[in-house]
Amino acid sequence: MQDSDPNTPLALIVDDDLTFRTLSRMSLEQEELRVEEVSSGQAAVDFATACMPDIVILDVQMPGMDGFATCQGLRRLPGGDFVPILMMTGLDDVESIAKAYDMGATDFIIKPCHGLILSQRVRYMLRASRTLNALRISASSLAQAQRIAQLGGWEWDFVHDRLEVSDAVCHILGILPASFNHTQSAYLGCVQEGDRDLVAEAMRKAVADGTGFDLDHRVIDTNGTERIVHFQGEVITDDVGRPQRMLGTVQDVTDKRATEAKIYFLANYDGLTHLPNRNLFLHRIAQAICCGMGTNIIGAVLVLSLDRYQRVNDMHGPRSGDQILKEVTGRFQRALSTSTTIAQFAGADSTMLARLGEDQFAALLTNLPTAEDSAKIAKCLLTSLEAPFQIDGTTVMLTASVGIAIPGTDGTEPNLLLRHAVTALQAAQNSGDRSCQYYCNSMNVSIAARITLEQDLRAAMNANQFVLYYQPQVDILSETVIGVEALIRWQHPTRGLISPAEFIPVAEEEDLIIQLSEWVIKNASQQQKTWRNSGLPPFPISINLSSLHFRQRNLISQIRSIVIENGGDPPYLELELTEGVLMTNATTTMTTLKQLKGLGFRLAIDDFGTGYSSLAYLQQFPIDTLKIDRAFVKDIKLGKIDSPIMRAIIGMGRALKLHVVAEGVETRDQLAFLRMQGCAAYQGFLFSRPVPPNHLLPLLQSHLRQPIPKSA
Ligand code: C2E
Ligand code: MG
Ligand code: MG
């Protein structure tokens, strides 16, 4: 052996004739092959069992196991399928050549032959074998890759309607390769009936145009489940450009499509309500605008927000909150489908309901007869919330506000339209009547002012910009001061003194009121201590308690500790509550009121007469004082010095043994009337405006009644 490099191809010569073996070896070694020789068939099989050669040169006529049997034996060995076997026959007859091929020979050569011919033949066979091997490896990798990708290939000779498909295609189609009859209609037969025409038409068109196609169709797999298949093909033309056949792939994309659908859903829909989200909503506005909305088609963009949803969520927990949002969705959807007929427009296609965030929904309306019809539909949406919501056995009432922007008039850019609708919504919320507002340009200004106020208010808390003013309460008969009401003022760094009427509602909405309320109680208590220390006799200070603060869970313990820590005296502190507080949830209100009374606080009903509650109803609560709203006192003017309502309220207040205080007394006529009716006390500009403590001190020193009675 010339070369022992294991990469050099190994040839095995099998012949019982030593001379032939030697000659053959010489010519092959010149070709730089490694050569081994054996003299019998059995020895060849034994050799190949231990080490499979790269080529076998095999004599046919040998004693014992002849060449044919040896060839068969070699083929049966592991790795023996593809080894090239060159049979050498001395018999120049067709029969033995045919037999050699039958037994698995790769080629044959007539013996004796020239050494050069033999070596050339071997060289050629080795090269072919290497190419075949490489092809086999790549075919097997391709098959494996296709199996992983659930991909199969096909080729269609459409001239003769012969369709070849790979096993992988059959697997994807849910059929056995043997049962496929190789025509286009056999393939179409595997396609789901509903998709069949689509596939046939795509193939027909590709053939006609000499192009390709690319589509998804459904099939039923061997388990009877529906799969989605991506079917792709391309026309192959001959040298002169005539379409000849079509090549393509079939891929099972069921899982891929499911994932894509999920991703699409997550990107465009809200997971809770399954409504389109902001993204898809904006997209639909853009589409509608392209189709003429805002030019020749009238449309509207509505943004709806549930009032005080956050509070419902806090009280009942997020699960109930979610449940409410789902029910709201259902109600809005029903309202939209019925209101479309009310407004008589094109149909359900013309609307889209979306969820923009937390408690914010949006609706796109197109094909409206008039822009005003959007308000009718908005009204239907609001009305749909009127029926109470049943959540975990309790009843929850919900209202909402709506802002409307009209495409065209209010803009043609989706984001801008949505922003304008939100601005209109904020205006609706701020207007207090919680209804529906169309967008107008001036809104941006007032909304900006409101946003600035909110921001400033938060900063004011930390910057200590609040002060308490005090307004005296005066005994009507003796005209002496019998108490004061603490009224908060905001010393704004640029705007000056801001009235509580302006910022208290904002503080309530932005959840700053509790903090503010605590500050008032703390400061009034400290003021009480200061006055006491200055030698003044004790007198009641009235403090306004916001309903939100009153509903605070730990109200009692919190108020007590603030008052005590800051030197306040509960029997000389009167907490003013509005009728609204007493009207809702009577049982818990009663408990809280009793607890406050238990701590020694006095209790007053503020702004009485505005809440339409009857005095008889209020009688059940442990109230000390009744403050008649300024609006009724205003009624008593010069020349009209009677007010039946005032007479009734004062009369009933007295009968119920309440300390009756009239608010907003500005004239002596009003005072005279109140005195005549037996009203006990008043508060008003007539005696003094609310003033800071240092201005109040001289007034207290000269007009404070002594001693102050403990109860009315
Ligand atoms: P209120 O509790 O009814 O306070 C009486 C309001 O009437 C005060 O307005 C006072 O300045 C005004 N007033 C008194 N006498 C007259 C008069 O003769 N003529 C006129 N035109 N007005 C008079 P103010 O200080 O602007 O407070 C408005 C409301 O803001 C208060 O109404 C009260 O509901 C609320 N508020 C004030 N301070 C606080 C506070 O510390 N906490 C809470 N939660 N609310 C407060
Ligand atoms: Mg008050
Ligand atoms: Mg009042």
Image (spheres, grey):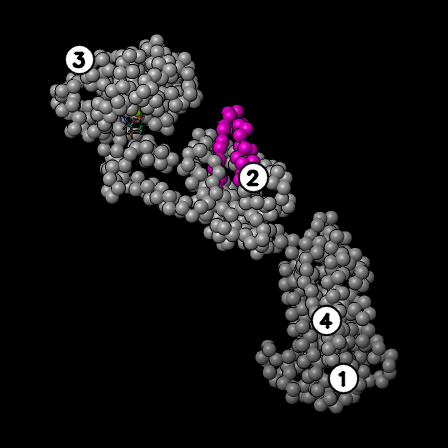
Indicate which disc, 4 or 2, sits on the residue closer to the N terminus.
4
Question: Marks 4 and 2, how far apart in space?
Answer: 53 Å
- Residue that carries the numbered disc 4 in the rendered image: 210
Using a 10 Å C-alpha cutoff, classify the residue at mark 1 as few (fewer than 14 neighbours), some (14 to 19) or many (20 or more): some
Classify mark 2: helix, strand or loop: helix
Please tell me whether residue 100 is drawn above or below residue 507 in the rendered image.
below
Residue topped by disc 2: 377
The part of the chain drawn in magenta is 374-403
- Residue 486 in percent (x, y) is at 25, 26
Q: In this orientation, which residue lies closer to the viewer: 96 or 174?
A: 174
Closer to the camera: disc 3 or disc 1?
3
Tell me whether circle 3 and circle 1 mark residues in contact (CB < 8 Å): no
* Residue at x 64% of width, y 44% of height: 347
Residue drawn at x 58%, y 47% is 366
Does residue 566 appear anywhere in the picture?
no
Residue holding disc 3: 707
Which numbered marker is on residue 17? 1
